[in-house]
Amino acid sequence: LIVDGAVIIVENALRRIAERQHHYGRTLALEERLSVVTQAAREMIRPSVFGQAIIILVYVPLLMLTGVEGKTFTPMALTVIIALVCAFVLSLTFVPAMLAIWLSKPVEEKEGRIMSWLKRKYEPGLDRAMKRPTLTIGVGTGAFLAAILTFSFLGQEFLPQLDEGDLTAQVLRVPGTSVDQSQAMQSRIEREIGKLPEVRFVFSKTGTAELASDPMPPNISDTFIIMKPKNEWPDKSLPKAELVEKVEKVLESMPGGAFEITQPIQMRFNELIAGVRGDIAVKVFGDDTDAMNATANQIAAVLRKTEGAADVRVEQTEGLPMLDIQPRRDIMSRLGITAQTVQDTISAAIGGRDAGMIFEGDRRFAVTIRLSDTARANLQTLGQVPVPLPNGGFVPLQSVADISVTDGPNQISRENGKRRVVVQANVRGRDVAGVVADAQAAIASEVRLPAGQYLDWGGQFENLQSATERLMLVVPGCFVLILLLLYWALGSVRDAAIVFTGVPLALVGGVLALFLRGMPFSISAAVGFIALSGIAVLNGLVMVTSIQELMARGMDRAKAAHEGAMMRLRPVVMTALVASFGFVPMAIASGAGAEVQKPLATVVIGGLISATLLTLFVLPTLYARYGRREMDIPAPAKRPDAPMPDIAEAPL
């Protein structure tokens, strides 16, 4: 992208210097070289200025992104914009000057073997394309329609899932499980997972520390599984999905809890986005917790049958063991015992009561007495706690109250003032949008929401929707501005529309490249499409500018379209190759974070291939048939002592 403007100007300047030297039959002096380079730069200043402006403009929508996607791509957009502005200034000042100074030796414009071979192959194909305009335009239109159809099979996700290398397994046990019980069960899990040959070590975190910002009850443990480097694995080609399956089998063999497997950063990332640790969150809102739990369990059953949904679980809102003491008021009234007396007795036995003070020097400590932990956990012992009678004497607590252990609410979550129960799931083997679409359709047909309840979908899908909606508003406006710039550059609505056809033609290759590599559409791929549209328009602008110049010299439209395409074959191919080679390292990268870069680079490379091929054949055909009929602009100024040839590709 950065060198595109310089490539166009340098290619034209070299060609003009070679023509002038051929005309004079000698090497040009510095003053003459400066004059020729200046004229060559002026010829290309219009496509260069407007082309770079359009490329800068297509990055503006990225500055409008907010949230996670904004933090990810806004720095890249700012960097590219600043680099393009600086490169644009240098391409019009430093590059032409240095070119004139350094080219002190004879310059001979000759084509290499590759370029000569390309021209020999290109010209017959161009002739056939222009002789059959309906077929050529139909092929381009058909390719675009096929790309739209293929896009519907790609699937969608917010951002590509990074391979962090390590895994995290969250283990959920029955509410009320003590720390000692959780620790004993967790130690066994750590030992069994640690036996896997790919695992370096395992450690866990159970419950919440005193100063922690992540509240978590003692029945939940986060298990962090640190992997060995891949070169130390017995099977170095083992896919990450199969490794996750091996960990799942170990956890499934451990009784006493449910689990979900994710990655450390991904888990926190999801939790910060939607308040849950899964990739998908279905939030059930309502007023009746029991009815909401029933609905949530129905939704969970549907999700478990949905292809691609894994680790489905319902938020633990109930099941916490609670001591339930129900006073028997008929007996209490016969004995003259008040409810307050029973309440005070229970509070003293379970919660404790201050019985005095202990003094140690200047320090003093309150003395609180209560039943021991063992006695408080024993219903029979609690039943023998004496309750005082009004006239003296005592009766056991179990004679005036029913004592039992019941399941109470584990937690009551609220969002925007409404009670909420969350069903969450991770996505494996499919795209997030595809799983959500299937799940939404199944839930709509199988789950009937009671009155007063409604659903809300969160997680990565929520961010994908938000970013897509924002881009759907900004990108069309950006395309309108591109059309206005093209009209300003070319002076014709027809010509501007013809150049703009490079955008849908470029999308063909981008979509096909994603499909062939099995990548879903993501915000990263959307950024690639945005960058691609600028490059595609630049190539078309360069070609149409040359066609207009030839028409201004007196050529008819069809011949000018043919000769302009032949003349600009080299810069168009060079621009596409330079940009493609620049993205190849990103497309084949395998290091940390490569998953985010691959869709972007894949789209740009695939789109450049299709845009270049279709621009070289479809655009000249479109112009020969629908372009401006005649040019009113004057031809470029020519010095009387050195006439420029009409056709730039003069044989030397």
Image (cartoon, grey):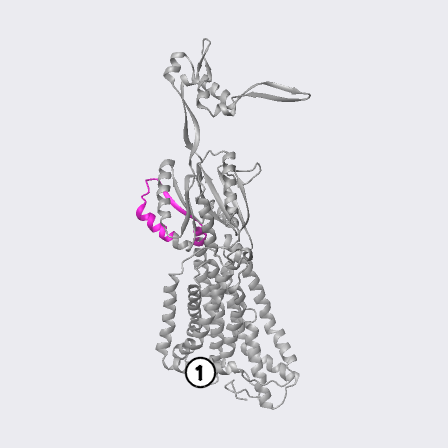
With 62 as the anchor, is 29 left or right in this view?
A: right
Specify whether 127 is left or right of 63.
left
Let me know if residue 210 appears in the view.
yes
Query: In the visual, does 134 lie left or right of 121?
Result: left
Image height check: is 204 above or below 523?
above
537 in the magenta segment? no
Q: Position of residue 320 (x, y in %)?
A: 44, 33
Residue 602: percent from the left, percent from the top? Answer: 48, 65
Q: Secondary structure at mark 1?
A: helix
**Quick check: 396 above or below 96?**
above
Amino acid at dot 1 = Glu
Name the image quarter holding the C terminus: bottom right
Magenta part of the chain: 436-465
Task: Relative to 534, say whether 301 is above or below.
Answer: above
Query: Which quadrant, please, contains the N terminus?
Result: bottom right
- Residue 384 placement (x, y as % from top left): 45, 18
Q: Residue furthest top?
A: 391
* Residue picked out by circle 1: 123
Is residue 288 in sight in this rendering?
Answer: no
Mark 1 surroundings within 10 Å by alpha-carbon count, few (fewer than 14), some (14 through 19), many (20 or more): some
Residue lying at 48% horizontally and 85% vertically, measured from the top left: 553
Work out whether residue 402 or residue 289 is closer to the camera in this orientation and state it. Answer: 402
